[in-house]
Image (tube, rainbow, N blue to C red):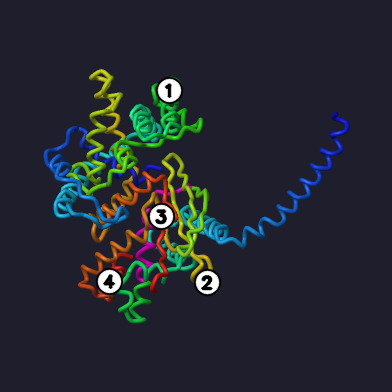
Amino acid sequence: MYLLCSLTRQRGILLAFRLGTSALVAVLLGGCVASPDPNSLSFDPLEERNRKSHSVNKSFDRAAFGPMARAYGEGLPPPVRRGVTNLQQNWSQPSYVLHYSLQGKPELAGRSLMRFGVNTLFGFGGLLDVGAELGMENRETNFDETFKVYGVPEGAYVEVPLGGPGTQRDWTGWVLDSLTDPVLLVTTTAGGYALVGIAGLDILNDRYELDTVLDELYNNSADSYTAQRITYLQNMRARLNDGTGVEALEDIYVDY
Amino acid sequence: MWTTDTPLMKRRTFVAGMLAGAAVLLLPRFAAASPVSEAQELVVTISGELGRLVNSGKSGNALYRDFERLLGSYADMPAIGASVLGQPWRGASAAQKSAFISAFQSYLATKYGRQFGDFAGTSITVTGGRDAGRAGVLVNTVATRPGRDSVSVDWQVSDRSGKPKAVNLIIEGVSMLANERAEVGAMLDAQGGSIDGLVAELKRRS
């Protein structure tokens, strides 16, 4: 499910700068501008600044991120990478329980809690995903979704240097998520480093799994900045709405 | 109690069996008549063809050109092309329109064909379908890939051309039409708005 969603998780490369750069904070606090049309793919008041970030991100991807991801993906067998992903997902569940509760979705909160219990106890601390085999599939959530549930608009599209695509709402949520993760709040320092390390490796895995898609997007697009914005926005909205609805379809025979 | 009930139960079971049998005989005919199931049948057919193509062992140009033929048979390329080009379509001559559709079809086949390596061994399962009125039918499928995350693929199918054809593909929420509209728009801008320049650029990318 997370093929394209992972585009957004590339931002995690910023884990080293957990509180974000001052530029990011300036953008986030610089007034939330709401798009006149919530389904718009072209609303982009920060385009000039975003395009600069995009060229930084493309160079970074070509020089470091992409090669590191391929080294990780080609160097480690799939079951090992799967284990890292499972650990990352498992230790994210307590945060999901919190968010699903805030969103008023008790059944999803319960599923995340059960999943966390089962995988921690019977899956070697989450190395194996026993829960998925019992019908408890992983479903990600975060402050972006919680904000959406409370009616907060996406705000402008923001591409962050070394962080990747997002919106004002999404990036604000990401900073808050880093600060409020229940596991990171209660764990030891060593445990915290281990979890951040696992999250970092899983980001490399996401980048590796997306290699063909990103290669096409970065290197073969007529306008890779716009292609990434459109891809990110559609994917994020479909993820938050649990799929594409019929109302999103256009009548392609109009006027021709 | 049981002895008196049994014949009645048997009769009921018999009647129920008859009705079920009749339903089984009738269902496929009803099903074939609905646009949703027709669209789903088309998606199953296309998925089968795509599966054969992805696992054919072909690569590069041979693969892309086979895919290009599939697009021609199962997708309404003139309507897709017109919708992607938008406003400039109306000002184009008949010759430009047909040159654009043909170049756009090759370009799409090459661009998406390059991703096929990621889908070796994939099986596509239809998980739903809904009538979207004038927009056609939305068919939901999941592409399950060995050892990797599954991918949600939605197909927009329309019979406005006279028979059911695919008119859009939505992968993990990302609409091919929306993306190609932006891409083709950017190429057209780079060619100073010239359709002939755009056609040459699409051919260069095929």
Task: Measure the C-alpha gap from mark 2 to mark 4.
Answer: 29 Å
Give residue B91's position: percent from left, percent from top.
Answer: 30, 79
Q: Earlier in the sequence, mark 2 or mark 4?
A: 2
Please provide the residue range marked out in magenta: B103-122
Task: Measure the C-alpha gap from mark 2 to mark 1.
Answer: 54 Å
CB within 8 Å, label 1 to label 4: no
Q: Amino acid at mark 3?
A: Ile
Residue for point 75% across, 51% down: B21
Displayed quadrant of residue A63: top left
Query: Which residue was labeled with disc 3?
Result: B170
Displayed quadrant of residue B67: bottom left
Query: Which residue was labeled with disc 2?
Result: B162
CB within 8 Å, label 2 to label 1: no
Mark 4, secondary structure of its residue: helix
**In this image, B50 relative to A87: left or right?**
right
Q: Is residue A80 visible?
A: no
Mark 1, secondary structure of its residue: helix
Q: Chain of mark 3?
A: B
* Local crowd size for mark 1, using a 10 Å CA cut-off: few (<14), some (14–19), many (≥20): some
Q: Chain of mark 4?
A: B
* Local crowd size for mark 3, using a 10 Å CA cut-off: few (<14), some (14–19), many (≥20): many
Foreground tag (2 vs 4): 2
**In this image, B140 relative to B30: left or right?**
left
Q: Amino acid at mark 4?
A: Leu
Q: Image quadrant for the C terminus of chain A?
A: bottom left
Task: Measure the C-alpha gap from mark 1 to mark 4.
Answer: 57 Å
Task: Measure the C-alpha gap from mark 4 to mark 3.
Answer: 25 Å
Query: Which residue was labeled with disc 1?
Result: A117
**In this image, B8 relative to A59: left or right?**
right
Task: Measure the C-alpha gap from mark 2 to mark 3.
Answer: 23 Å
Residue for point 38% across, 48% down: A238
Q: Chain of mark 1?
A: A
